């Protein structure tokens, strides 16, 4: 560490306010985080390996998705596509089905593109260099840093929502974390901690709790069964873990935080105010009418096109209602034929980004009139519906058709 220069510092007057205590050095903070993580890390399946492919898959899945949701998806993914080669060669329908329900499907398509690029340009071996990782499709600065540090123990910083919250509170940063200058400062602070971890002796995970104070809420699984974590890997994971379990958005557990004594926000009673909350976009309500057309024991489904939300996934024919509630009128508009009977099946409410969507699903009959499939449409039996990758709302409708709760 560079020594602080004192050559031209002026002596403070005797009656001046006491200066704010200086934040401790990154090495002290890094060591405290490593000590805490060594005995408090959750036993997550992707922490049992240093395979960069497995770690990469977990990081992509965890974007915008909770850990408890990701675990079964990741385990199934690694069973079905255990290697980069298997991912690169998988059919698009296979990867979409494995991803069904995780949302943000561009992620899985980029995952396969990157695997194909690794096989073509890197001999099927995941690259170790940060810049080479960053150049892969769908990998940004955070994900590249996570892979480089966790898989290869490189002092690459990371900055996700959890880490931003921890650093803003730790350093008392009140400015907008997304503002360019503030964001650059946060990256610098994360980099200082990663570099500090690289200077520390490798931390073997302890078999006992040692001096760490354990808490009953939230519940944390002891990490003693995990592989020995190298310091750069453990440091970045500890920041994410701290934000997820202790330094939470609401009601953080400051009393058991391993770096509480270094925290400016706690010292200044500003924990609840930091980081500055995001300005949320206005919510837009949208309504859709979904048509369940059956002919000869088969249902009509359609595949969404490229370059749209939920591209390449399957759904039942539907129209945005735009305030119209007449299912007969909308069905005639969609199919060019007037239905002979309609029956409501279920109503699905869900959200995509800033949209709050209500989908009303109806079984629609056309009597002797034959409805043609057409481009991007096909007729499927019940068992075939189960094998297709549907959008989240339409999967719930398909489950209802099979006699399961609509939700």
Image (cartoon, helix red, strand yellow):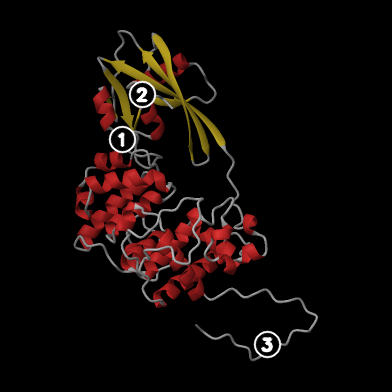
In the image, residue 310 sits, relative to residue 249, either above or below, namely: above
Q: Which residue is mark 3?
A: 9
Instruction: State the separation of the CA atoms marked 3 and 1.
Output: 66 Å
Q: Which residue is mark 1?
A: 389
Q: Would you say residue 237 is visible in this rendering?
A: no
Instruction: State the separation of the CA atoms marked 1 and 2.
Output: 17 Å
- Residues marked 1 and 2 touching at CB (< 8 Å): no
Q: Is 294 on the left-hand or right-hand side of 257?
A: left
Mark 2 or 3, closer to the camera: 2
Q: Nearer the viewer, residue 33 or 302?
A: 33
Q: Which residue is mark 2?
A: 404
Q: What quarter of the picture does the C terminus occupy?
A: top left
Mark 3 or 1, closer to the camera: 3
- Secondary structure, mark 3, is loop
Instruction: State the separation of the CA atoms marked 2 and 3.
Output: 73 Å
Say which residue appears at 29% left-offset and 25% top-offset.
Answer: 374
Residue 334 in picture, x, y percent from top left: 40, 21
Q: Nearer the viewer, residue 264 or 304?
A: 264
Q: Residues within 10 Å of mark 1 (few under 14, many from 20)?
A: many
Picture quadrant where residue 308 is located: top left
In the image, residue 384 sits, relative to residue 244, either above or below, namely: above
Q: Is 354 on the left-hand or right-hand side of 109?
A: right
Residue 211 in picture, x, y percent from top left: 48, 67
- Secondary structure, mark 2, is loop
């Amino acid at each position: 560490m560079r020594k602080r220069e004192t050559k031209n510092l002026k002596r403070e007057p005797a009656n001046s306010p006491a200066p704010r205590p200086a934040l401790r050095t990154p090495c002290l903070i890094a060591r405290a985080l490593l000590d805490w993580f060594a005995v408090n890390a959750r036993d997550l399946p992707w922490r049992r390996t240093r395979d960069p492919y497995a770690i990469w898959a977990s990081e992509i899945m965890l974007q915008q998705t909770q850990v408890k949701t990701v675990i079964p998806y990741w385990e199934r993914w690694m069973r079905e596509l255990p290697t980069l080669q298997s991912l690169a060669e998988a059919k698009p329908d296979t990867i979409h089905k494995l991803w069904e329900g995780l949302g943000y499907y561009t992620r899985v398509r980029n995952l396969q593109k990157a695997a194909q690029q690794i096989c073509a340009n890197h001999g099927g071996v995941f690259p170790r260099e940060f810049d080479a990782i960053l150049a892969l499709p769908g990998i940004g600065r955070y994900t590249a840093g996570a892979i480089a540090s966790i898989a290869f123990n490189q002092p690459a910083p990371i900055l996700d929502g959890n880490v931003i919250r921890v650093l803003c509170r730790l350093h008392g940063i009140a400015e907008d974390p997304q503002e360019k200058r503030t964001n650059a400062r946060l990256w610098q602070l994360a980099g200082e901690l990663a570099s500090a971890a690289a200077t520390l002796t490798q931390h073997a995970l302890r078999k006992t709790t040692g001096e760490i104070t354990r808490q009953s809420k939230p519940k944390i699984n002891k990490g003693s069964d995990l592989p020995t974590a190298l310091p750069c890997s453990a440091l970045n994971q500890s920041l994410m873990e701290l934000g997820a379990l202790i330094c939470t958005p609401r009601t953080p557990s400051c009393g058991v935080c391993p770096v509480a004594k270094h925290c400016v926000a706690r010292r200044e009673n500003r924990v609840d105010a930091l980081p500055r909350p995001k300005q949320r976009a206005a919510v837009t309500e949208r309504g859709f009418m979904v048509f369940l057309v059956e002919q000869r024991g088969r249902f009509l489904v359609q595949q969404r096109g490229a370059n749209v939300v939920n591209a390449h996934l399957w759904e039942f024919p539907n129209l945005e209602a735009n305030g119209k509630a007449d299912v007969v009128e909308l069905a005639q508009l969609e199919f060019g034929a007037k239905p002979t009977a309609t029956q409501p099946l279920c109503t699905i409410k869900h959200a995509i980004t800033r949209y709050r969507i209500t989908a009303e699903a109806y079984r629609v009959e056309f009597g002797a009139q034959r409805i043609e499939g057409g481009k991007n449409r096909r007729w499927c039996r019940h068992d075939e519906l189960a094998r297709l990758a549907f959008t989240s709302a339409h999967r719930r409708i398909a489950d209802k058709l099979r006699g399961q709760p609509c939700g």
